[in-house]
Amino acid sequence: MKTKLRLIISIIALILCWVLIIDGLYKVISLHTNNWGTILVGAFFLLAIGPNVYDHFGKKPQREQQFGEAVPFDSEKQMAVIKCSICTGEQVAGFKDKEDGHFTEVMLIREPGDIERFKEIYKIEEIKKEY
């Protein structure tokens, strides 16, 4: 129920953004007034709100669709590893081959919840960090 209400509010906000843009364009074209501010405000909100609306249409977010199916995990031949950059702090979760050390990137860790999601998807209890 709460998700549907958020979806409805987001769609209404998206429609209002389009109305702002179309209204601004109409005034610029037909009345030859300088109404570019309205168009820019509408475009800004459209870009800010738009991606959030599309995540609610019964699909998994794009970054979660690929996990689980695309990269198989074999615990006998691979181990779960998070590669951390010393310079930037960027973290990438993936699997390291135990025989040759080849690392297969699976997901970029953007927030602490991503590590838990990675563990849950691949049913992993422990992840080693490498720098």
Image (cartoon, rainbow, N blue to C red):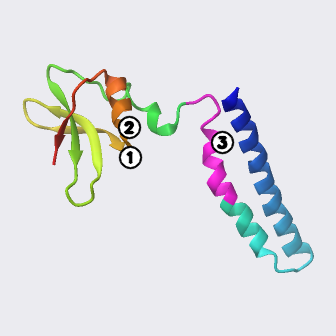
Picture coordinates of residue 7 (x, y %)? 70, 37
Tell me: residue 96, above or below residue 51: above
Closer to the chain start, of discs 2 and 3, is: 3
Which residue is under mark 1?
A: 110
Picture coordinates of residue 60 (x, y %)? 53, 31
Q: Which amino acid type is marked by label 2?
A: Asp
Determine the main secondary structure of the stretch shown in magenta. helix
Using the image as rendered, state which of residue 54 and residue 118 is in the foreground. 118
Picture coordinates of residue 116 (x, y %)? 35, 31
Q: Nearer the viewer, mark 2 or mark 3?
A: 2
Mark 2, residues whose alpha carbon is within 10 Å: few (<14), some, or many (≥20)? some
Q: Nearer the viewer, mark 1 or mark 3?
A: 1
Residue in the picture at 69% in, 37% down: 6
Q: CA distance from mark 1 to mark 3?
A: 21 Å
Checking the image for residue 114, the label placed there is 2
Residue in the picture at 38% in, 25% down: 69
Secondary structure, mark 3, is: helix
**Quarter where residue 94 is shown:** top left
Q: CA distance from mark 2 to mark 3?
A: 21 Å
Picture coordinates of residue 80 (x, y %)? 21, 31
How many numbered marks does the figure carry? 3
Tell me: residue 17, above or below residue 105: below
Closer to the chain start, of discs 1 and 3, is: 3
The magenta stretch spans which residues? 45-59
Which residue is under mark 3?
A: 53
